[in-house]
Image (spheres, rainbow, N blue to C red):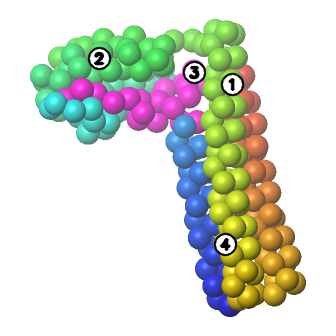
């Protein structure tokens, strides 16, 4: 049974890593005054009859610290890329130059910094909820194993503690990531 519990812990770790990775991607989309290709990754473009990620219609570049460019592969999609960036709610105003869409990154206002910090907090809370959901699934599996008499009461206590320690470590990592992002937002 120990092998099954080890497999359980590996599964929970993998799923909690997924929640942390999602948080990192969400944070990459929060601009902190510097140009980053991750800023445009959540943008979806209406192309060929469906919505596709911007990375499927062009290449994102950073030619200078306060400028992003999107080299659009299909000239007919330049307008759609511009529209998608403008409508993404990122506070960006792109401009087309042939097949290249230039996206200047404006200075952040104090109000926008506060808004970004709140958004970062919401993303972090979503990640915490996801990690707690994984913990709940793990605890349910341990209780189910106990009901089937696959593990003893002592094992239940020990493994419940292990799952809780794992959860606490991921919550701590989420909190650290949030603190780093908030510092980054305030520094710029």
Residue wearing tag 3: 33
What segment is highlighted magenta in the picture? 27-47
Real-space CA distance between mark 4 and mark 2, rounded to the nearest whole angstrom:
48 Å
Image height check: is 184 above or below 66?
A: below
Q: Secondary structure at mark 1?
A: helix
Identified at 78% across, 51% down, the residue is 172
Q: In front: mark 3 or mark 4?
A: 4
Q: Position of residue 55 (x, y in %)?
A: 31, 38
Q: Which mark is residue 117?
A: 1
Q: Which mark is residue 141?
A: 4
Residue wearing tag 2: 82
Q: Are marks 1 and 2 in contact (CB under 8 Å)?
A: no
Q: Residues within 10 Å of mark 4 (few under 14, many from 20)?
A: some
Q: Secondary structure at mark 2?
A: helix
Q: Secondary structure at mark 4?
A: helix
Q: Are marks 4 and 2 in contact (CB under 8 Å)?
A: no
Q: Is residue 186 visible?
A: yes
Q: Which mark is residue 131?
A: none
Q: Residues within 10 Å of mark 1 (few under 14, many from 20)?
A: many
Real-space CA distance between mark 2 and mark 3, rounded to the nearest whole angstrom:
20 Å
Quadrant of image for the C terminus:
top right
Quadrant of image for the N terminus:
bottom right
Q: Position of residue 180 (x, y in %)?
A: 72, 37
């Amino acid at each position: 049974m120990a092998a099954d519990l080890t497999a359980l812990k590996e599964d929970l770790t993998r799923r909690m890593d997924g929640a942390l990775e999602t948080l990192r991607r969400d944070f990459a989309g929060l601009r902190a005054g510097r140009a980053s290709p991750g800023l445009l990754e959540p943008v979806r473009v209406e192309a060929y009859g469906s919505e596709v990620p911007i990375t499927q219609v062009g290449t994102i570049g950073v030619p200078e610290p306060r400028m992003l460019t999107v080299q659009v592969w299909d000239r007919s999609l330049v307008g759609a890329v511009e529209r998608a960036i403008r409508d993404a709610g990122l506070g960006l105003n792109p401009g087309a130059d042939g097949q290249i869409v230039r996206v200047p990154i404006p200075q952040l206002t104090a109000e926008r910094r506060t808004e970004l910090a709140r958004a970062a907090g919401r993303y972090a809370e979503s990640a915490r909820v996801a990690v707690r959901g994984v913990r709940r699934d793990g605890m349910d599996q341990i209780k189910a194993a106990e009901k089937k008499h696959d593990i003893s009461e002592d094992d239940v206590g020990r493994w419940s503690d292990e799952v809780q320690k794992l959860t606490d470590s991921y919550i701590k990592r989420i909190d650290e990531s949030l603190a780093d992002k908030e510092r980054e937002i305030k520094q710029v």
